[in-house]
Amino acid sequence: MLLAIDIGNTQTVIGLFINGDKLAQSWRMVTPRHETSDEIASNIFSFLKNSDFKPQDVKEIVVSCVVPRILLEIRRMCDKYFKIEPFIINTDIKTDLKIEYDYPKEIGADRIANSVAVKELYGFPAIIIDFGTATTFDVLSPSGAYLGGVIAPGIEISSEALFNYAAKLSKVDLSWPESVIGKNTYDGIRSGILYGFLGQAEYIIEKIIDEMQKKDEEFNPKVIATGGLAILMNGRSRYMNIHDPDLTLKGLKLLIDKNKRAV
């Protein structure tokens, strides 16, 4: 069994692959901030045991991490509790992805995994939108090269800033209101947040397509949405035609397989 761990700034997603490429189960938890390797292991063991899997059956671990301070504890956890050296995703590994980016080492491991997964599973050209702590847009060219993208503040952190700095506004749940015109403050806030971020995504997609079509009139990308908050946009967009909540985990599986074959 392969344990895939995607450590984001806000959430950590853990997936278990069995029988080859099959994602048997996935779990989400708040990204550890000050937890030790022992505490992280306790959470992962609980996930596995509560889903009737045995921790000792894990034979491989692959990790993507955008929070450097957590990586040392993850390595310690893998060594102490699984007796496994984890495979860490970075730009030095084999990806089969041509990267046309000024500073490739600046690309987050999760964005690499997403791009590899989309290239392998959905094809190209493509635009990948990851709704997480930040909302990221990544672009694959008609030849499958990674061109770069856009990084915008995420839905939750932007909402938190609104509530923290506007004294009379209280937190709302992130569910769609019945109308874009809010008849009360609660619905007005929900409308502003959700329609606002949908509009932002749509506009950025349009600008990417417009810019790319000036170079290639046939540029007609698939648009894949992923990330913890992508479900909010599912079915709402003119462009986001694929929703894959497990995209990053699938990319991690593909990356470790590519590098095993390369040895």
Image (spheres, rainbow, N blue to C red):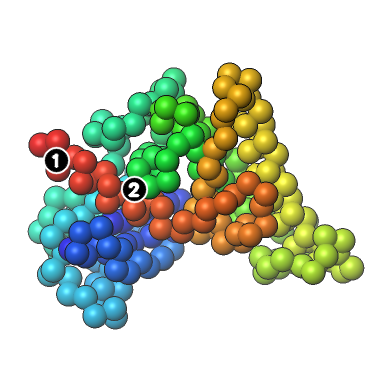
Does the rendering let one see residue 66? no
Residue at point 37%, 67% (across, down):
27
Where on the picture, by quarter, is residue 35?
A: bottom left
| Position in image of residue 158 (x %, y %) | 65, 51
Q: Quadrant of the C terminus?
A: top left
Residue 16 left/right relative to 107 = left
Where on the picture, by quarter, is residue 99?
A: top left
Give the SS element for disc 2: helix
Circle 1 residue: 261
* Count of marks, rendered view: 2
Residue 210 left/right relative to 180 = left
Tell me the amino acid under the disc marked 1.
Arg
Q: Nearer the viewer, residue 245 or 141?
A: 141
Tell me the amino acid under the disc marked 2.
Gly
Q: Nearer the viewer, residue 6 or 147?
A: 147
- Tell me the distance, in whole angstroms, between the alpha carbons under discs 2 and 1: 15 Å
- Asked if residue 199 is positioned above or below residue 262 in the image, the reply reads below
Circle 2 residue: 251
Q: Nearer the viewer, residue 13 or 35?
A: 13
Residue at point 27%, 51% (across, down):
253
| Position in image of residue 141 (x %, y %) | 47, 29
| Position in image of residue 40 (x %, y %) | 29, 64
